Amino acid sequence: MTAPAVAGGIRQWLSAVALVLTLVVISLSAGSFLPRASLRVYLTTGAFDGSKNDAAAAADLLLSEKAFQDGQERLPEQNAPSATMNSSEASLDTGSCDLYRGEWFSDSSGPLYTNSSCPLITKTQNCQANGRPDKGYENWRWKPEQCILPCFDARKFLELMRGKTLAFVGDSVARNQMESLLCILWQVDTPVNNGTRRMQKWIFRSTSTTIIRIWSSWLVHKSIEAVEFAPNGLDKVFLDIPDETFMELLPSFDVLVLSSGHWFAKRSAYILNGNVVGGQLWWPREAGKMQMNNVASFGVSVETCLTAVATNPNFKGIAILRTYSPDHYEGGEWNTNGSCTGKVKPLDEAVRNGFTNTMYEKQVAGFRKAVENSGVRGAKLKLMDITKPFALRVDGHPGPYRSADPNKKTQRGPDGKPPPQDCLHWCMPGAVDTWNEMLFETIRREHAG
Ligand SMILES: *[C@@H]1O[C@H](CO)[C@@H](O)[C@H](O)[C@H]1NC(C)=O
Ligand SMILES: *[C@@H]1O[C@H](CO)[C@@H](O)[C@H](O)[C@H]1NC(C)=O
Ligand SMILES: *[C@@H]1O[C@H](CO)[C@@H](O)[C@H](O)[C@H]1NC(C)=O
Ligand SMILES: *[C@@H]1O[C@H](CO)[C@@H](O)[C@H](O)[C@H]1NC(C)=O
């Protein structure tokens, strides 16, 4: 199942996605963005214009820099230039600032790599090579309200991860994030491919850093064998059994990034305590009312998986749950002419998407229960809360530019329908690179204590 699931590419995600409400495009008001020049200056060069806010930001940068280099605690607050900080600025302390509340701004310094400097961009995500005419989507950077999200420094990342292993476990969106990280790191060190059928594995020899990806559609055990009245052949998702394919390897991971969700739109039966409790796109009428739908099942699967990870005594690392990745189909679903064509800027206010919202809520609730279930070991679990920031990135998907077919906009299938768009995955380079900046910052904070 693993290999075809990985290789199946488009078919797999197509069958995995089923969604969505009509989106209303809210045009951007340029005025709502932060002043570009000064932001850019402090994010990229570390030079400051001397204004109060920039001075505070400088302190912040220095503190995080120092913490990083020493691999020690952050400097105590009184060492910061407190004369320039009022109480709200004092919370610029990067350790406590909420990374996921903020806004997007356009940064003319451009992306961390290009389609020509990274050799492993999946064709369906190589939007430039597929003829996407606009490029602005590559340049948006995220600015948390109370601190800065440092630009990804590949050498520092490898140094921090010296001798360590980072694993991505999840579906094709997890692969999207892994490939983004590899592309970023590729700019400073060419990795050795040591993958197997079971997992992708890349080794950066300069620091013996290993990046792994393991396919897991639901993060819990699955099988196709019959259970009660759920027939052989149908996918059974065991909501209370973690997925053994990656749990076996758990002790070797220093950082584990988990994500799931989109496969809960796929046809399957849900099993709890050995009983069939629900199904998605499958449920026999004579079975009566189902106990759990796909959204509730998703929440339970998250709790199961995270609790098992955190409480495993041989797991010495941290596990980061990347929250549900929002999609942006407009005017239909993926298979009914849904589109994100022509979106060239982030929204400045998210459009409500009922399915995304409830998936996100169940996922976060599952995370919180797992933290509770795990006692002191609950501290190993971190939430990478990307759903809301990325609900704004309507511009970040391949849309029709998921294939190099020059006729993609006019081509019709035998049924007269245009080929489906990809408004779920993310173009590379592009928005997905920010996930890795958030990941780096999360690891750095953990390291800094
Ligand atoms: C403190 O800093 C914030 C953000 O820079 C600013 O909006 C606020 O007016 C400042 N308050 C005082 C009392 O200086
Ligand atoms: C990169 O994108 C450009 C268009 O911007 C295209 O001409 C080129 O073939 C692409 N290269 C690769 C290696 O994908
Ligand atoms: C790749 O894996 C094989 C075993 O699967 C191992 O013998 C070899 O040393 C590995 N290569 C590197 C560069 O680690
Ligand atoms: C999709 O678009 C085609 C033509 O553009 C139209 O004939 C068809 O009815 C549309 N399908 C749906 C489900 O809206």
Image: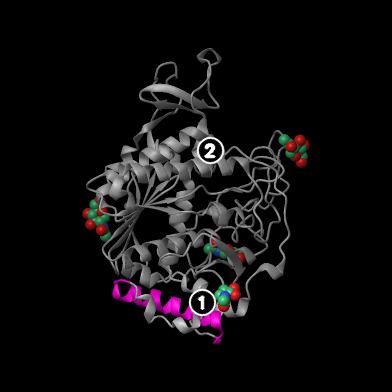
Query: Furthest-top residue in view?
Result: 286
Q: Which residue is mark 2?
A: 16
Secondary structure of residue under mark 1: loop
The image position of residue 190, as x and y in percent, is 37, 66
State the residue at coordinates (40%, 20%).
226
Nearest the viewer among 372 and 193 is 372
Report whether 376 appears left or right of 400. Answer: left
Ligand 1: does it lie within 8 Å of the C-beta at label 1? yes
Report whether 184 appears left or right of 332. Answer: left
Residue 108 visible in the displayed image:
no
Q: Which residue is mark 1?
A: 86
State the residue at coordinates (44%, 43%).
6
Q: Main secondary structure of the magenta part?
A: helix
Q: Amino acid at mark 2?
A: Ala
Is residue 439 found inside the magenta-colored segment of the image? no
Nearest the viewer among 31 and 344 is 31
| Image: magenta residue range | 49-73
Using the image, determine if residue 52 lies above or below residue 196.
below
The image position of residue 375, as x and y in percent, is 30, 46
User: Are circles 2 and 1 on residues that touch, CB within 8 Å?
Assistant: no
- For the residues labelled 2 and 1, the Cα–Cα distance comes to 49 Å
Using the image, determine if residue 436 lies above or below residue 413.
below
User: Earlier along the polypeptide chain: callout 2 or callout 1?
Assistant: 2
Secondary structure of residue under mark 2: helix
